[in-house]
Amino acid sequence: MDLDTIQHDFQSSDEEVRRSTLHSLRHALLNDVQETIFSAMGDENWRVRKEAVETYIYLKPDLRSIEQLLKLLRNEDNAGLRNSAAEALIRLGAQCAEPLLSMVQDIDADLRKSIIDIMGAIGEPVFFTALLVALQDPAVNVASAAAEQLGALGDAEAAEYLMKAIVERDEVLFRFSALGSLGALGKQMSIPAALLNLAEQELFKKAVFDCLGSIADESSYKLLLDGFSCRQKNCRAAAVKALYRVYERSPAVSQATIRESLQLLKENDIITGLLELFNSKDMLLTEALLWTSVVTKDNRFIPMLIEGYADERTASSAFAALKNFGRDAVQEIDSRFATLGDCGRSGLCRLISECGYSQFNDVIQKGLRDSSAQVRVSAAFAVGKLGLITMIPELVLLVDDPDLYVFAAAVGSLQSLAIISRAKILTEVGRFCSSEKVQQRKAAALLCSSLGELNRLLLLIKDEDSKVRSAAVTALGKCRMEGSGSALALSLTDEDPEVRIAAADALGMLLDPTIIGVLEHALNDEDVWVQSAVLAALAKIDPARALAVITSLCADAGGLLLITSLKILQEIGGPESENIIRRYLQNDDQDVARQAAASLKKCTTSSTLSR
């Protein structure tokens, strides 16, 4: 395309014609089309301007061309042109350093600011000195830009210079920019009184508090504590967050001093002002308020903690804080029980059980009958933890619950209660064993394990339902009772693969070398999941034998069985295991290759640590 055609196409009213014409210039020499590209950088359409920048970068401009590009920043009439030129300079990065540095002291203050902004966006250390010098620029917008970009550059050596400049320059814009950058650098340092005194001015309170949160030591805690009573909410929030951050990095002795001072706020009106700050979107503020609640132990925080517990992001820390309030928190929540959501009602049951408050049995009893499965789970666990044997009948009813988590919680608590009320649980187990309900017979298997009822388990592993048989087999393995090995070995021939898998897992728990032959025979199972479980059990009992089996298996194995073999090899370790694993690093099956790489890494790491 010749230059006349290019110029003609650039007169088109169709933006796509102008854009595609620019794209075609990538085959030209930059010297021939530079003016055209520069003109397009000021096009009225953003897509055309974007293409102009991309084409300019593609043509790899030299230093002379970059110097010409910089002149576009002087254009006062076309903001799009200036922005495109700045974008191109930023994209070119370090190769623009020399021409940028040559213009940083230009007589045009607006141009100096643009140059400094570009330097900061490029972020090269070579600009550091020039930015420091610009802190003293007579034009406040230039000096403010320099302060801001020093923060972006991230060199902590700038902190002292920023601190000094904040004290010396009294322009509001500059001080805001410098305080922000000083905080961003996060370098802990001694704070001059002149900077602390800025907090006396309402305008600077928040900026000073934010900065102190990043750089101050415990010596500033009194100023931050005073900030808790600021009239402006954003200033109070900044003070709370800053004190929390200072506390976190302070030595133990100073932390104790801060806590003692904060505890004086208990029952003070200042707490009311802090409660107004709670905002679940600001996680740092939420953490700071949770910490404040724990330190002050002011009961007025409890409603806030309940709300915090309802949010999964803060549930754990809010729950820990609620525990700190003990009975006061439980009583407060109990009074609100009917209005709480599922998470709140569940949390109350957990709180009661964690604190061991058996006097709130009525709450737990309500929880066992709650419409929410989440609440029923927490209540069921609480019964076991609190040892509430009077609620065994309610737990028995939950064995039939359609929710599997509720079922597990109910059975788990019945197992716990068997320690203190064996006779009652045995009575229920007897009833469960003869029940027509699969879920009750499954519960019987799990409870027999806790009670050591081997004979009943031996009957349940022959149950007509595979779920019951599987549960009984697993329970038998956990019992590790003498004589259970032969029964479990028989379950390796069960018609249901899930039962056979459970049997293999259980035999692995027994660690009985006399059943190695049985396991090796079971490696011929038609189900690869069973084979994998059997191989894993064999490795638990006799790693050396498992290594020999894997060596012979690997030639024909694939998929799941091969992945299981690789996992076992990484646990066995040693040169022989490593050699086998290396064979599969380039396997066609990507899952196998990934597992081989992970296994080899773990294997070699373990070898290095053992030396």
Image (spheres, rainbow, N blue to C red):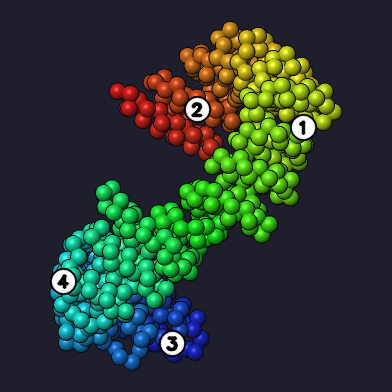
Please say if 177 is above or below 331.
below
Marker disc for residue 439? 1
Query: Which of the two discs, 3 and 2, labels the residue nearer the N terminus?
Result: 3
* Image point (62%, 53%), residue name: 334
Q: Residues within 10 Å of mark 3 (few under 14, many from 20)?
A: few
The first of marks 4 and 2 along the sequence is 4
Residue that sits furthest to the right in the current view? 436
Tag shown at residue 44: 3
Three-letter residue code for mark 2: Leu
Q: Are marks 3 and 1 in contact (CB under 8 Å)?
A: no
Mark 2 and mark 1 lie on one chain; the one further toward the N terminus is 1
* C-alpha separation, residue under disc 4 versus residue under disc 1: 74 Å
Kind of residue sitting beneath label 4: Lys
Which amino acid type is marked by label 3?
Glu
Q: Earlier in the sequence, mark 3 or mark 1?
A: 3
Q: Are marks 3 and 4 in contact (CB under 8 Å)?
A: no
- At x 72%, y 18%, the residue is 457
Depth check: give the residue in front, 316 or 587. Answer: 316
The residues bearing labels 3 and 2 have C-alpha atoms spaced at a distance of 62 Å
Pick out the residue farthest to the top: 514
Horizontal placement of 607 versus 324: left or right? left
Discs 3/2, front: 2
From the image, state whether disc 3 or disc 4 is nearer to you: 4
Rounded to the nearest angstrom, the CA distance separating label 3 from label 1 is 73 Å
Q: Which residue is mark 4?
A: 164
Q: Nearer the viewer, mark 3 or mark 1?
A: 1
Amino acid type of the residue tagged 1 in the rendering: Gln
Using the rendered view, name the quadrant where residue 561 is placed.
top right
- Percent from the top left, x then y, of residue 344? 61, 54
